[in-house]
């Protein structure tokens, strides 16, 4: 009985010890973060200001600011590192070791290149200050564009062959800047640009797409010419995809480099966009390639293409041919490529 | 003095002898309790908004991110025996081009290799086009998630509204519910013919009611601006963790708490991952920390991911994307001629250029196997993306490297009429390539000294026609 009690006590003790260890592990996971007691001779970093507002700047403009700090502590202040957020560079422009009552500077450079609107960026200064080992500095600004276009990219999305669609392109100039839009043009023959309304500082263009004669994805640019020195030309990319009665993906089957005697498989998904369309026949070449077709849903089919190349080595250039009752796409050819080696 | 000490030692010995088995048991149980702390722990790892960034481009040291380091981080947990659940939060690509489509394929291959449990749909994923996205959803083993959309296109997009993930590793199997929403504000107009987006709160309400009591932890992937996610977190206190923040470049300070729910972002470009650490005690889950971890060189390259990245470059080569990209015509009928043509008259300048790092720019790229990558090539050749500019090495060898025309502009008109003013350069031209993403240490005066060439006005030419 006494032995049993002793074992019970030991078990209880073990659980307590186990939980204690677990608790220590938890504290470790949480990272503690408790401040050490400041030593009697400790450095103390203090900045004149922790935020700097550059105000209004032009897109593409570069700005510089120096954050000044002083070591108000008794110990020597050592700047370990200066880390900046994306878009700006920051560095210590004075010495690393700052004695009592000495001053230092953090130089922050910001290139507004790709930004527009009100933004704020943070810089972190790591030092041996026991109370403030990581100081956050912030730069703020409002980045304006002399000329801006909306949208930055036009995506026409998926459109049926023979149909047309349009998008609006707004071009704005900075009020009072005397910036003029000289010309808006494109080298894509199926896009027509029509000036819709013209205000003092804004122009609206209708970007109409019609008559694309090829299936598949298309892309190009609209060029906006201005008399701005900062932005004499703005390229607005556009893209879209013209589909017919049938769509398929991918539009080529590339097996890459494969070893002989190793069977490989690729998949094509065919969607019958027009309900009345039926697949009548499928052919595949070369002869060592096979396929099988199965329904995915009412509109789509899965074609699995297998390559049973056996001992063949060399380059394969074949095709998967899909025949249908579509007048637009009676025959679809999906190229097949592979390199087979030993 | 000796006797009491002797008796003490003897007593201690007798105690140890008597309870030898019990002491052994104590040591054993303590050890179990200690090692058990890692098996009762699991982590959720979130990454996304890669926006096409498969790997750091390698332009400078200290770049963050990449699938290779991500894989190593995931494996480091697995090596420690800590279950790590990987989640992709959406926006794999940045634009609807073919290169991005290829990247998407490779990112899915990487996710599969990493054991990622699902991919949350972001608006940029839809931008790639529904035929491609539909194909990806049907052919990838990874689940797609989006809780507040309905697809009305003929393209069969396979996705789930939410996912209930079981963790069988623990003594009492745990269930984590992953919910997902996308903000309507992010869906572009041209997609609205194919996608219907519903109010996130209305869509989440029935799901949360359904899973309440069934899930031990509810996680929301909110593909939405921060403010919208905060509102959702306030509405549903049942949610234990929210991963959100759309387009946050620097996520380090994104962590906030809405009541007691942590809400954070992993940022854009795949540079960071969000890691939520949990311990399981008596069948309940307790969050011990949430961190935003930078994927820096602390994480070594993963062999499998490096092989995948190599395959990606081979695909770019096989598809010859360099030649197939659209080309912009140059202004006023100008055209590129290549540095060798400039050197016909400007011999000293050409000789000087031959000893600069600009003249090795293409070699730097080809040594790293990235010479078929359109994203890299434009800053390592002359005139890429323009009619008459570099298209591929086989046909445009004379336009490889950063040449005369990279800084001075196309020289076609100048070579036709050498009296025409030509050659002015300024810092802005340098910044097109020496930007913060690729050359953060760039300082114009310092870098200018490295490439500054001597003035050389060919005989008979007035000096003011050459800007140098």
Image (cartoon, coloured by chain):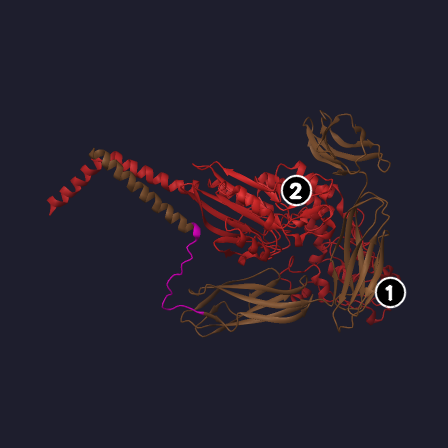
Q: Residues within 10 Å of mark 1 (few under 14, many from 20)?
A: some
Left or right side of A45 for A145: right
Front position in the image: A205 or B368: A205
Mark 1 lies on residue: B418
Residue hosting label 2: B106
Determine if residue B392 is in view.
no
Q: Nearer the viewer, mark 2 or mark 1?
A: 2
Nearer the observer, B464 or B444 = B444
Chain that bears disc 1: B
Q: Residue at x 78, y 63 (%)?
A: A233
Chain A representation colour = brown
First in sequence: mark 2 vs mark 1? 2
Between the residue at mark 2 and the residue at mark 1, the CA separation in whole angstroms equals 49 Å
Please check the rendered image and state whether residue A33 is part of the magenta-colored stretch, yes or no.
yes
Q: In the rendering, which numbered label is found on residue A322? A: none
Q: Position of residue A244 (x, y in %)?
A: 81, 40
User: Looking at this view, is B228 or B341 the one in front?
Assistant: B228
């Amino acid at each position: 009985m006494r032995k049993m009690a002793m074992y019970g006590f030991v078990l209880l003790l073990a659980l307590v010890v186990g939980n204690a260890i677990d608790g220590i592990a938890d504290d470790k996971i949480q990272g503690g973060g408790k401040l050490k007691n400041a030593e009697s001779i400790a450095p103390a970093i203090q900045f004149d200001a922790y935020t700097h507002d550059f105000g209004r700047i032009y897109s593409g403009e570069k700005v510089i600011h120096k954050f000044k700090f002083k070591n108000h502590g008794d110990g020597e202040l050592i700047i370990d590192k200066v880390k900046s957020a994306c878009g700006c560079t920051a560095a210590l422009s004075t010495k690393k070791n700052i004695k009592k009552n000495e001053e230092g500077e953090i130089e922050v450079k910001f290139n507004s290149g790709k930004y527009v609107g009100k933004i704020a960026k943070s810089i972190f200064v790591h030092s041996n200050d026991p109370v403030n080992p990581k100081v956050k500095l912030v730069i703020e600004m409002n980045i304006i564009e002399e000329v801006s276009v909306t949208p930055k990219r036009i995506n026409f999305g998926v459109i049926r062959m023979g149909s047309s669609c349009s998008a609006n392109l707004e071009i704005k100039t900075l009020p009072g800047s005397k910036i003029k839009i000289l010309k808006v043009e494109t080298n894509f023959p199926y896009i027509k640009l029509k000036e819709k309304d013209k205000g003092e500082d804004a122009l609206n263009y209708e970007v109409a797409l019609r008559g694309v004669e090829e299936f598949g994805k298309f892309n190009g640019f609209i060029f906006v010419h201005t008399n701005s020195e900062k932005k004499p030309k703005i390229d607005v990319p556009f893209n879209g995809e013209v589909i017919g009665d049938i769509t398929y993906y991918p539009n080529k089957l590339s097996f890459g480099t494969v070893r002989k005697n190793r069977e490989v498989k690729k998949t094509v998904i065919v969607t019958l966009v027009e309900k009345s369309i039926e697949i009548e026949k499928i052919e595949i070449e070369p002869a060592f390639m096979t396929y099988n077709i199965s329904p995915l849903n009412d509109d789509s089919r899965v074609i699995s293409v297998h390559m049973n190349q056996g001992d063949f080595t060399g380059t394969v250039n074949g095709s998967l041919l899909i025949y249908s009752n579509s007048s637009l796409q009676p025959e679809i050819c999906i190229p097949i490529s592979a390199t087979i080696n030993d | 003095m000796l006797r009491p000490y002797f008796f003490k030692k003897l007593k201690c010995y007798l105690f140890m002898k008597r309870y030898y088995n019990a002491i052994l048991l104590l040591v054993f149980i303590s050890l179990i309790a200690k090692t058990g702390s890692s098996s009762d722990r699991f982590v959720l790892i979130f990454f996304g908004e890669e926006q096409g960034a498969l790997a750091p481009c390698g332009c400078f040291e200290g770049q963050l991110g990449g699938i290779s380091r991500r894989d190593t981080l995931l494996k480091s947990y697995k090596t420690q025996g800590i279950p790590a659940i990987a989640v992709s939060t959406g926006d794999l690509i940045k634009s609807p081009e073919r290169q991005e489509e290829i990247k998407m394929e490779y990112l899915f291959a990487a996710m599969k290799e990493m054991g990622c449990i699902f991919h949350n749909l972001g608006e940029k994923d839809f931008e790639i086009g529904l035929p491609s996205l539909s194909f990806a959803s049907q052919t990838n083993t990874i689940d797609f998630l989006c809780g507040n959309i309905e697809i009305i296109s003929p393209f069969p997009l396979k996705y789930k509204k939410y996912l209930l993930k079981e963790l069988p590793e623990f003594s009492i199997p745990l269930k984590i519910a992953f919910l997902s929403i996308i903000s309507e504000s992010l869906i572009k107009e041209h997609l609205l013919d194919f996608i219907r987006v519903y109010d996130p709160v209305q869509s989440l309400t029935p799901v949360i009611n359904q899973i309440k009591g069934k899930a031990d932890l509810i996680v929301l992937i909110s593909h939405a601006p921060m403010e919208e996610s905060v509102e959702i977190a306030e509405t549903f206190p049942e949610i234990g963790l929210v991963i959100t923040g759309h387009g946050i470049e620097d996520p380090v300070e994104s962590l906030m708490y809405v009541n007691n729910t942590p809400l954070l972002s992993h940022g854009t470009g795949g540079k960071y991952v969000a890691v939520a650490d949990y311990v399981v005690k008596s069948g309940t889950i307790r969050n011990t920390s949430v961190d935003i971890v930078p994927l820096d060189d602390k994480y070594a390259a993963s062999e499998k991911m490096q092989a995948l990245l190599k395959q990606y470059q081979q695909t770019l080569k096989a598809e010859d994307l360099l030649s197939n990209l659209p080309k912009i015509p140059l202004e006023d009928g100008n055209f590129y001629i290549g540095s060798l043509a400039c050197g016909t008259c400007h011999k000293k300048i050409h000789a000087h250029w031959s000893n600069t790092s600009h003249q090795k720019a293409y070699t730097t790229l080809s040594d790293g196997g990235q010479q078929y990558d359109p994203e890299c090539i434009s800053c390592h050749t002359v005139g890429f993306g323009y009619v008459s500019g570099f298209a591929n090495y086989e046909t445009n060898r004379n336009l490889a490297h950063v040449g005369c025309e990279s800084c001075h502009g196309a020289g076609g008109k100048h070579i036709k009429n050498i009296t025409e003013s030509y050659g002015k350069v300024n810092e802005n031209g340098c910044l097109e390539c020496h930007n913060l993403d690729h050359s953060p240490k760039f300082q114009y005066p310092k870098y200018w000294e490295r490439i500054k060439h001597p003035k050389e006005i060919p005989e008979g030419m007035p000096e003011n026609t050459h800007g140098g």
